Image (spheres, grey):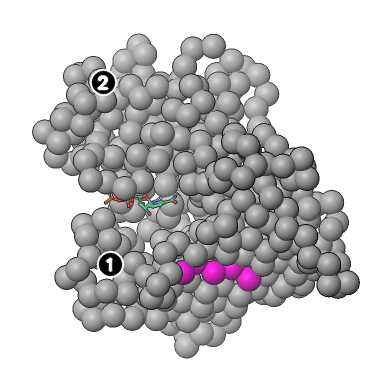
Amino acid sequence: MEKLKFGMIGGGKGSFIADLHLKGALFDGLGELTAGCFSRNREKSLEFGRAMGIAEERIYGSFREMAEREAKREDPIDFVIIAAPNNVHYACAKVFLENGINVVCDKPLTHYLYEAEELKRLAEEKDLLFGVTYTYSAYPAVSFMKKMIADGKVGEIRLVKAEFLTDNFAIPNEQLGKSMLWRLDPEVAGRSTCCGDIGVHAQNLISSVTGLEMEELSADLNVIGENRVLDTNFTATVRYKSGAKGHIWCSNVAMGKCNDLNIAIYGDKGSLSWSEETADIVVFNELSGCSVHYRMGTSFSSIGGSQMFRLPAGVSEGYYEAFANIYRNYMTALRNKKAGKPYEVNYPDVNCGIESLRFVEACLASSEQNAGWVTV
Ligand SMILES: NC(=O)c1ccc[n+]([C@@H]2O[C@H](COP(=O)([O-])OP(=O)(O)OC[C@H]3O[C@@H](n4cnc5c(N)ncnc54)[C@H](O)[C@@H]3O)[C@@H](O)[C@H]2O)c1
């Protein structure tokens, strides 16, 4: 089958995440970069597009122009990747959907929940596939833990805990780079820095591993650091519909922490824990005191996640491969859909984006009421 044609929004020189999207989408040879608007600045967009070998007429100076002109072509792109800052997501996803083009967008999906719900309605109305890149949900260890839980190894889940700790904003604003500064600006980032940017990863990780649905929560958002208006630290206590209890702590001012995303799940038979910093090891504990360290990529860990491994055991897989896993599943679904075959939505989709915005909005509402309990 022909390669899928995709375009990109963002990703110009000096940008961070677009390169991971690009490499992830190219990883398995299922697609090719055919068009793009890589910067708001037409010259910069052209410079990057030319360097990527894209035909001049398919390098655009605005995402709107790109969506409209691509849709009129006989060979339009099959999907667009939105890897620009948060304030671009809603308007950009909307115009591509309106023009009949499938979308993969980074998190947080939109500034407001109602915008994310509108995008979902539009995607359904136009019969288009909508992916949201919750990177950590596509780590092999996450599939492995899901399977351990489905196999009853943990029993009924009683407690969950997730943390995402960084020190990105532990320094004064004057020392921050461009890519970090917009995260503190409500016009660009939205109504939250910590909860909206990394809190949603912790929330989605719990949801991806356990399938637990939030019922209500109590949250405390803290603005730490001079000349800031948005939270750079937050804690949330969550009551899940099943009766399980959860704790989420995320911080951008945890000095010395780089990208410490971790999760622990405690059931009535056993417990599981995993940390992104040691991504290829899942620890399983039982009441007997028995503790098993499962190394991803070995025959022991082949259950559940075997299709997620690309490298032999002992060679760590991580961020790049997780992007590649999301894109492989998304593009396989899109190729099957195009061929009129059944397809599986086994990638994080628009519903995951909506669930995160419910979480962020509930955290904001709770924090405004001095950490009062709020229904999610
Ligand atoms: N999934 C993840 O693990 C993950 C990790 C980091 C960032 N992100 C998300 O990715 C997005 C981008 O973050 P980043 O850190 O790469 O930002 P960045 O500032 O490093 O890069 C953004 C790029 O978008 C371009 N851009 C801005 N407005 C544009 C527009 N209107 N049209 C075209 N290009 C435009 C900028 O010129 C820049 O090249 C954010 O939404 C962020 O939350 C996700």
Residue at label 2?
A: 54
In this picture, is 198 found above or below 82? below
Task: Write down the residue under mark 1.
Answer: 184
Q: Three-letter amino acid code at disc 1?
A: Leu
Give the residue displayed 47% in from the left and 16% down from the top: 3
Question: Label 1: how many residues lie within 10 Å, few (<14), some (14-19) or many (20+)?
Answer: many
Circle 2 packing at 10 Å, graded few (<14), some (14-19), many (20+), is some
152 drawn magenta: no
Image spot of residue 220 (x, y percent): 47, 81
The quarter of the rendered structure image containing the N terminus is top right
Q: From the viewer's perspective, is 6 left or right of 334?
A: left
Q: Position of residue 179 (x, y in %)?
A: 26, 56
Q: Secondary structure at mark 1?
A: helix
Residue 167 x/y as whole percent: 37, 70
Q: Residue, x 22% and y 65% (percent of image)?
A: 176
Residue type for callout 2: Ile
Cα–Cα span, label 2 and label 1: 34 Å
Vertical side of 376 occupied by 223: above or below: below
Q: Which residues are magenta?
A: 161-165
Q: In percent of the image, x 26 and y 25: which residue is there?
A: 52
Q: In the rendered image of this protein, does residue 96 appear above or below residue 368?
A: above
